Amino acid sequence: MAGERRRRGGDGLRERPRERGNRRERAEPQRGAGRGWARAAALAAALAVAVLALGLAAVEWDRWSAASRLVTPHPAPPALPPGSTGPLASPHLFWGTYRPHVYFGMKTRSPRSLVTGLMWLQQREGGGALRHTCEQSDGPSRYGWRMHDGESFGVQEIRDEGLVLKTEFVKRPGGEHGGDWSWRVTARTEAAGGPTPLLSLFFYVATDEQGTLWPRLDNGTQLAAVTGTTEELGRFTLTFLPPTTESGEDPKYASYNYLEAPSPGLHRLTELVRGSLSNRFVFAPPGRPRRRFFAVEALGGFPGEPPPPRGRLLLHQVTLEPPAVAEVTFESGSAAGRPGRLAGGTLSAALSRHAAAFESRFEETFGLARKGFPPAQRRFAQAALSDLLGGMGYFHGRSLVQGPRQERPVPAAEAALFTAVPSRSFFPRGFLWDEGFHQLLLARWAPALSREVIAHWLDLMNAEGWIPREQILGEEARAKVPPEFLLQRSETANPPTLLLALQALLPAAPLPYLRRLFPRLHAWYDWYNRTQAGPLPLTFRWRGRDPQHELFLNPKTLASGLDDYPRASHPSPEERHLDLRCWMALASGVLAAVAERLGEPAGLYRAAEQALSDNELLERLHWAPELGAFADYGNHSAAVGLRWQRGMPAAPGRPPPPPRLVREVREAPRPQFVGALGYVSLFPLLLQLLRPDSPRLPAVLAALRDERQLWTPFGLRSLSRDSPFYLQRNTQHDPPYWRGSVWVNINYLALRALRGYAEAAGPQRERAAELYRELRHNLVANVYRQFSESGFLWEHYSDSTGRGQGCRPFAGWSALVVLVMAEDY
């Protein structure tokens, strides 16, 4: 009817000019017609206004609806049952070293946890450096967990300018709030000339928005203990035992100071303590020279700032001459009938039992002694696993998100995440595509723990089926991220590597667990198919490439996880991304396997897997004859480069701005295959989509083994050495990242694939086995050598020297070297 009314109004407008010449002869009829016209015009105007209003309302509704779905959690029942991380449901995991960004600290898996931690200060002229958070630039020369079982026990070694600290913890179950735990910190100095600097150890406890703390002082200056109560913990007592010599029997002379202050937020604790230090204190051991040192004042806070209603901080400072041992015990008020305090000899015995159990379990799980690895390499592998487990964190907060229809970013719903982190110093937060690789290792060590982490990630899903690729939850996590990187955009994906880990867990995963996961897995899979579809059927395209392509040698593709790996030079909707297509083939197969285990319809998933694995179609869409390899396709120019451009003066008499590097395109782009041989080219092999008898497999293996292309003595490089993008900067301030370095995660996938082709009947079987043996040796030998020299696993490794590069420690996917040593794929 609305359409009919619009047509009638139009007829009236066309007839009106013809009536003007007959106005006198038809005066009365004219007046009636005029009134009719006025009514029609008014109706038309009202309708136009109504239509416009409805249109605007529809636009606003659509925008509001999209914004609402952006921050609305997915409606499926949670993958993680409510309350399952609490002290009653999961007491063995309630307490842990879940603050990976600090050198040593513990908290509970709860949103507003009581937190505990360690700082230290070597007393030097001018004060020295206060250590607390793991820093890439000025932290200790080496640090990391040497043993950590992910649950009840850990041993860490820290080396800091001649000081060696060993931090140990052990938990003891009991009661209704996660049980007891104890710390031991052993300090010694390495041989060096001159007097040994005094060492101050700072042990603190802080509440964040809930709970109460009461100090117990000895002699007015020594914080002997803290009693407290919180909602999650009930009553508890934290005791700071007097330090002893290394034997643990004789007392050690020490000076004591304490600090009591309002907690300004956990991200500002270092700043608060540093600002509370004064050098008016004197260390005066009997019969020894007196020395001035820095210590905290009893009452602290930020001058000029009102006390924040956040919570309290209580800090115990003990200053002494190394070597020495200091212990801290936490006793839960609900843990009745304990055999005695977990300290001294009792603590030593507990640590020894846990260490022996860890070594036995490690060998049972990975079998490195049976494979002939010497003790030093087994200790290295234990450290790699332990650093990954010791890098697990519990985070709570809101992501900052923005959709393509939103003008401004908005905070997402509150969420919690239990996850491993790539790097304690540089990336102490959750990354979606990293986590799937982390869980490949953790799934072997602790399958139930790994299943829980995967469930945590899937519960971050919004109503659209999107999971933000980077999780920055809470003030402590935000404090480590530059503001420009806080925002997560809802069109941006990340490789679904969680499905790699789920594939490994699937045979033994309990059916109730899979039933909880399945609706979210389906929604995630559907989201990829809806939002990352390519220009042709069965093609896919990463969204979110750098839009200002004129500023980059090659616009980055952060969504792919491979950041600056060369893609089409001019981003466009015509792109076809090979790696995403392969990930979707994997996803289809895993979803089909889950559905089949649950007795759910799996036909559509199996059909998608078959279509995406079709080798002939894969060749038609992604085989580049001129490259002799698989490749991306898009609007591309190979004739691009960076050149210096001088800036024009902003105004007469003013100096010009400094020159900058800008991109120069010497040949117009056209639709073609992208001539970049590297990790992306290997994806049909990496995810084992190529048939063992594929006619393309020999060329792929040849490129893999060619030292002019991908082969190095240290592993496979990420981009061929003969590529024009090899080791090239992307901008003036953007060094190469995935343009030549050796990355452990992709080398792991390559080894897994080569092992698979070596075990399958086909003409390349012997060649694959030979490459597998050689590549495995090269990778393990180099990663071990770099760890021995530096004390760290690294983010990536130089393809020319093998030296560790990027951030460190990087016990994220680089810890996959343990599975490579164990030949567990």
Image (cartoon, rainbow, N blue to C red):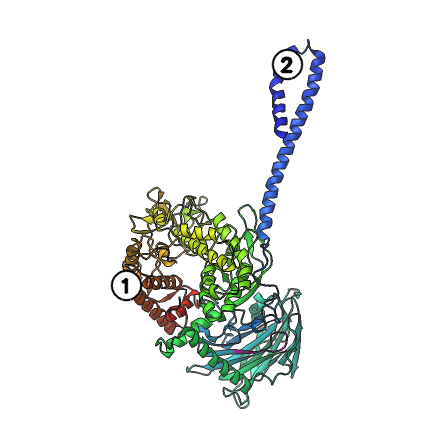
Q: Nearer the viewer, residue 375 or 403?
A: 375
Contact (CB < 8 A) between labels 2 and 1? no
Q: Report the side of 218 relative to 467 (left or right).
A: right
In magenta, the rendered stretch is 169-178
| Residue 24 tag number | none
Residue 39 lies in what quarter of the image?
top right
Q: Residue at x 46, y 69 (%)?
A: 388
Marker count (numbered): 2
Question: Which x, y percent locates residue 113?
Answer: 61, 69
Q: Residue at the far top: name it.
A: 25
Answer yes or no: is residue 284 visible: no
Question: Which x, y percent locates residue 705?
Answer: 28, 60
Q: Is the C terminus in the top left, top right, bottom left or bottom right quadrant?
A: bottom left
Q: Is residue 173 magenta?
A: yes
Residue annotated with mark 2: 19
Against 174, residue 737 (above or below) is: above
Q: Is residue 73 magenta?
A: no
> Dot 1, how many residues are within 10 Å of its Cα: few (below 14), some (14-19), or many (20+)?
some
Q: Residue at x 65, y 33 (%)?
A: 50
Question: Which x, y percent locates residue 540?
Answer: 43, 48
Amino acid at circle 2: Glu
Q: Nearer the viewer, mark 2 or mark 1?
A: 1
Question: Which x, y percent locates residue 279?
Answer: 56, 76
Residue annotated with mark 1: 766
> Dot 2, how many residues are within 10 Å of its Cα: few (below 14), some (14-19), or many (20+)?
few
Amino acid at circle 1: Glu
- Separation (CA) of disc 2 from disc 1: 95 Å
